Amino acid sequence: MKFYRVKPDSKYYIAILAAREAEKKLLEITQAVRKEFDLPECDRYSISPEYYYHDVDVLEGEQLKAFTQKGMPKKNSKLGKQIIGFYDNLVEEANLKAIEPERLINFSFGIMRRQGETLERLNGLDTMYIKSDAEFRFGALDYLEEITEAEYVKAYLAAVEAKEGAKNETQV
C-alpha cells in the first residue's frame, strides 16, 4: 500500500476542487427543482449536469406519471418537459454543462483504479490524500507526492477531528 498527498498547485487538484464545487451547485439546483415543482424530498438522487433524476418511490399521481421508472422526467409529458427545461436552464445559468465528474477527472489524470485494486481518498481537509495499491498511469505522479503511512494516519486523524468538531458545532 502506498500513500500520497495531492500537490495543491497541480492541475489535478484544481480540477477536483472545481468538480466538487460544481457538485454543490448541482445539489442546490436539484433542490430548486424540487421546490419549484413541489416534488417530495428523497434520499436517492443523482447529480449530473446532463439530466435530472428523482426517486420515483416517493412520487404519486401526476408527478409519478411525469417520470420514467428509472427516475428521469419523461420528454412526452407536459410536467416532464417543464422539469427538464427548468433544470437545463439552471444548469446553463450556473455554467455547469462542461464540468466533468470526479471519476472522469481521475481517469483523465491517470489516477484511477482497475478492478481488484484499492483507491481510498481522504477528504475533509484543505489537502487531499490518497491511499492505494494501484500502479498509477504514467504522469499521474506529477500530481502526487508520496508520503509515509504515519503522515497519512496523522492527516486521517485530523480529518476525523475536524468532522467531529463540525458535528458538535451544529448540535450546539
Image: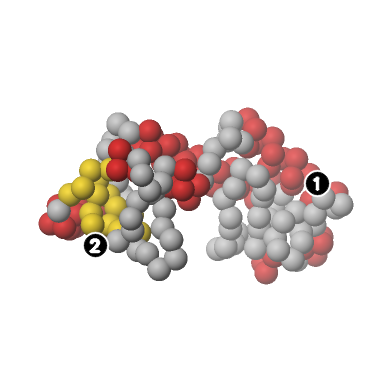
* Type of the residue with mark 2: Met
Q: Does residue 2 appear in this view?
A: yes
Say if mark 2 contacts mark 1, CB within 8 Å: no
Name the residue that disc number 1 marks: 81
Q: Secondary structure at mark 2?
A: loop
- For this rendering, which residue is in front, 146 or 79? 146
- Dot 2 surroundings within 10 Å: few (below 14), some, or many (20 or more)? few
Task: Left or right? Give the position of 100 relative to 150.
Answer: right
| Residue depicted at 21% across the width and 47% down the height | 146
* Type of the residue with mark 1: Lys
Quadrant hosting residue 95 = top right
Q: Earlier in the sequence, mark 2 or mark 1?
A: 2
Name the residue that disc number 2 marks: 1
| Residue depicted at 58% across the width and 55% down the height | 46
Q: Secondary structure at mark 1?
A: helix
Residue 166, position as x, y percentages in the image = 29, 52
Q: Does residue 172 appear in this view?
A: no
- For this rendering, which residue is in front, 165 or 134? 134
Q: CA distance from mark 2 to mark 1?
A: 49 Å
Residue 45, position as x, y percentages in the image = 58, 58
**Quadrant location, the N terminus:** bottom left
Q: Nearer the viewer, mark 2 or mark 1?
A: 2
